[in-house]
Image (cartoon, coloured by chain):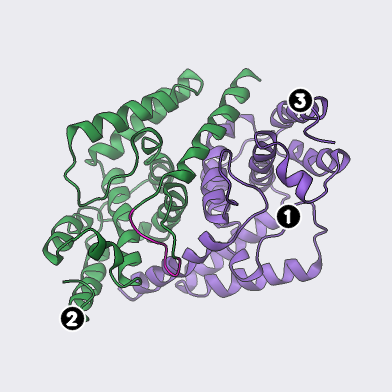
Chain colours: A green, B purple
């Protein structure tokens, strides 16, 4: 029962992810997306796209990673993918992850910290695929939202292509389709 | 590639779940919760609480159920758990689920509709546990938010206990802890 108490307290603590704001707006909405609804969106998207991973993946592990991948932002805040990843941001997120998972029973804590670290490192088939999926929704938001976040953050088309090309590390097929959409966006003047 | 196109269109369509508003406010926030961030919260909560299910569950299936369980609300809207479940609501949600999953390649469509139906019926170990988890966050929102939704919707303590007792169908241990918290809320005058 003490374990359940700890987990319920954790469930209350992670409510804070619903108040961490990202840099894109969901399709059709004026407000910015929060990291909790984003986490749902990528977990579901991974499930749908699993057959297009370059290497066989354990989709259950991929989904678990994506459910927890942004929890470090509760303490560290969200960073746009086009920002340079400084050591400071990395350290803050890691400290945040350790703090939050320390609320759980100890056998769970270590398991989740390791899973988060695997996602961050991004060098296993599961984490390469999870990271690829994580990059797609902000592109859809921009493609269906007049490139609002690219414009607002002054992101060039070169940067959009070079940063998101990493999608192909997880799924070449997915990158091929997304790349086509980005090229269309350039032609249509949404991405410049 | 055509399959990926369909899935990306589906990913855009389900963005609408981020604009379906529920009847409780996340802990510490003034605004109402949306069904997308709720879906993330319950999927993560199920993962954390899986060892307390009454019967062995396939946690991967439980999480999949919870990721899709509210998609029917895109067309039908959210209904508070204390409302009578009319046939009309059920029919609208089912029609919504069928419409939305019809956007996916056909082999995926049937798999997801069946998974949603299993959740709705709630008579397998996986769906009983998923339904139990789904009931917990609104209780936490009220317990940590001065019973705001109970007050606003005129929900008696008898109703709160009787409706949520169904949590014990999925996890007796979880219900036992939650029940203790509800009793405390009655003592503190939050639930009347």
Query: For the residue carrying disc 2, how many other residues have a C-alpha within 10 Å: few (<14), some (14-19), or many (20+)?
Result: few
Instruction: For mark 2, name the chain.
Output: A
Q: Element at badge 2?
A: helix
Seen in the picture, residue A28 relative to B41 is either above or below; the reply is: below
Q: Residues within 10 Å of mark 1 (few under 14, many from 20)?
A: few
Output the chain of dot 3: B
User: Gap in Å between the C-alphas at discs 3 and 1?
Assistant: 23 Å
Magenta run includes residue A28: yes
Indicate which disc residue B80 carries: 1
Residue B150 x, y percent position in the rendering? 77, 44
Q: Measuring 41% from the left and 39% from the top, which residue is drawn there? A: A68
Q: Quadrant of residue A101?
A: top left
Q: Is residue B48 magenta?
A: no
Q: Which contiguous range is marked in magenta?
A: A23-29
Residue A175 vs residue A39, the one in the foreground: A39
In-image side of A104 versus B146 (left or right): left
Task: Identify the residue position indicated by label 2 in the image.
Answer: A187
The image shows residue B90 at horizontal and vertical percentages of 74, 66
Pointer 2 with pointer 1, Cβ within 8 A? no
Label 3 Cα crowd, 10 Å radius (few <14 / some 14-19 / many 20+): few
Helix, strand or loop: magenta stretch: loop
Indicate the quadrant where residue A174 lies.
Answer: bottom left
Q: Residue at x 78, y 26 (%)?
A: B188
Contact? badges 2 and 3 (CB < 8 Å) = no
Identify the residue position indicated by label 3 in the image. Answer: B180
Q: Which quarter of the image is occupied by the N terminus of chain A?
A: top right
């Amino acid at each position: 029962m003490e374990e359940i108490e700890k987990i319920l307290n954790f469930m209350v603590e992670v409510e804070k992810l619903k108040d961490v704001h990202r840099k894109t707006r969901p399709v059709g909405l004026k407000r910015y997306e929060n990291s909790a609804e984003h986490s749902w969106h990528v977990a579901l998207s991974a499930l749908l796209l699993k057959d297009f991973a370059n290497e066989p993946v354990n989709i259950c592990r991929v989904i678990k990673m994506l459910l927890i991948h942004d929890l470090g932002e509760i303490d560290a805040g969200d960073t746009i993918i086009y920002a340079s990843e400084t050591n400071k941001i990395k350290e803050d997120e890691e400290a945040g992850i350790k703090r939050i998972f320390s609320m759980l029973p100890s056998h769970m804590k270590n398991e989740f910290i390791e899973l988060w670290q695997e996602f961050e490192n991004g060098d296993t088939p599961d984490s390469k695929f999870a990271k690829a999926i994580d990059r797609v929704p902000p592109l859809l938001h921009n493609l269906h939202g007049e490139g609002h976040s690219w414009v607002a953050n002054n992101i060039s088309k070169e940067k959009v292509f070079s940063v998101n090309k990493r999608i192909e590390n997880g799924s070449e097929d997915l990158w091929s389709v997304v790349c086509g959409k980005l090229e269309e966006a350039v032609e249509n003047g949404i991405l410049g």
